[in-house]
Amino acid sequence: MSIRAWWASRRSFGFDVLVAAIGVALGLTLRMGRDAGLVGWPYLHQVSAVLSGALLLYRRRAPFGSGAAICAVGLVYPTHVLYFAAYAVGAGVEDRRRAWGLIGALVVTTAQPWSHPRPLNIVTGAGLALVPVLLGLYVAARRRLRADRAEREVRERQLGFERVRMEERARIAGEMHDVITHRVSLMVLQAGALRTRARDEDVRASAEELRLVGCKALEELRGLVAVTRSERQVGSVVVGPRAVLDVSDLVADSRSAGIPVDLVTLGEPHPTSPVVGRAAYRVVQEALTNVHKHAPGAGVDIRLHYVGDEVRITVRNSAPTRAVDVALGSGGSGLLGLRKRVELVAGTLRTRPLPDGGYELLAILPAGATTTTTTTGEPA
């Protein structure tokens, strides 16, 4: 414990002892009326004052319990400690229903209607008891207001950090876009030049295929940066209209690479929001990439099932027929990044191995989901 915390705890305990001592002194010196109380035993006034003052030491730790005990002692013989208890209950009891019940009992005990039956005396006693109650309620409300203000400041500070982080991320995405676009554009231009100069037909066909792949990479890169940039930033890309999911190019590329892919669409296809469309496209793309990497020679079955306002994507591949012969690299976020991307649009992603040695990926996406965050853009 630090010196400041130790001193604060000692100072608080000293203040509690001082309040209890004042309560005992007032209880011993002043009487709340003449012959007040339900029992007329000798020395009961002194015992009640000392016991009530001792109970005040627990007013912070257990405001309701100490207040109820002081109220019970006050029924036997009331002392001025009842006013301190009324303040402690109003300021320290969080449950308002229990607090008001105990406050009513303390007010009645302080007013002593059985000893002072005159209405003026009852009203005066109750009014005097309500003064510390109202003061305690004010202190409690002010404490809650300070706590809410501190919590709001912490939340605003966190939001500020998050905003700065997102802006920095968008800036990095913009720089990455500029650098990679420049390099890929050079590759596309060189592929186009090779297609023009080459005399061999196979070389020209390969150069054209390389050029088309580069153009597709540029298009996907711009779409990815559009997600990470804010719409208010200069150079941001405006989200496009709703469109029907189309993965025919991914299927064609996989088939051209020697992987048998079967694509089946169930239900009535309907347009999805751009965010969901990009996430669904990445689901199929990542699933096919994993087949290329880890299951060479396996057959793939892709099912796009439109059910109500949901799009269910199932990608199932059989067991690989040969060992991996070409290393395609690693280091991306893979399924973890894909799961984050799917959850971002309020979807779910489940994966499981199949008994025959294959693998299954199931993604359920809401067709009309939108997102207000800019934290997507993980490589999938």
Image (tube, grey):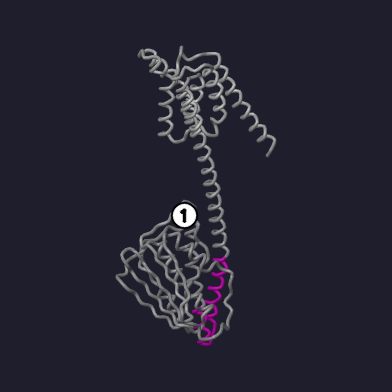
User: In the rendered image of this protein, does residue 245 appear above or below residue 25?
Assistant: below
Residue 317 in picture, x, y percent from top left: 45, 79
Which secondary structure is most common in the magenta stretch? Answer: helix
In what quadrant of the picture does the N terminus appear? top right
Between 131 and 295, the one lying in front of the other is: 131
Between 210 and 293, the residue placed more toward the observer is 293
Neighbours of disc 1 within 10 Å: few (<14), some (14-19), many (20+)? few
Q: How far across and how far down the image is residue 42, in percent?
A: 52, 16
Instruction: Tell me what residue is drawn at x 63 percent, y 33 percent.
Output: 9
- Which of the 4 quarters of the picture holds residue 21? top right
As drawn, is 372 to the left or to the right of 309? right
User: Vertical placement of 137 versus 113: above or below?
Assistant: below
Report helix, strand or loop for mark 1. loop
Q: Quadrant of residue 58?
A: top right
Identify residue type, mark 1.
Thr
Q: What stretch is highlighted in magenta?
A: 180-209
Considering depth in this image, is 255 or 134 the residue closer to the camera?
A: 134
- Looking at the image, which residue sits at the far right? 3
Q: In this view, does 194 lie above or below 229?
A: below
- What residue would you read off at disc 1? 373
- Single out the residue that lies furthest toward the left: 268
In the displayed structure, 199 sits above or below 228; it is below
Residue 330: x, y in percent? 58, 72
Is residue 302 in the magenta section?
no
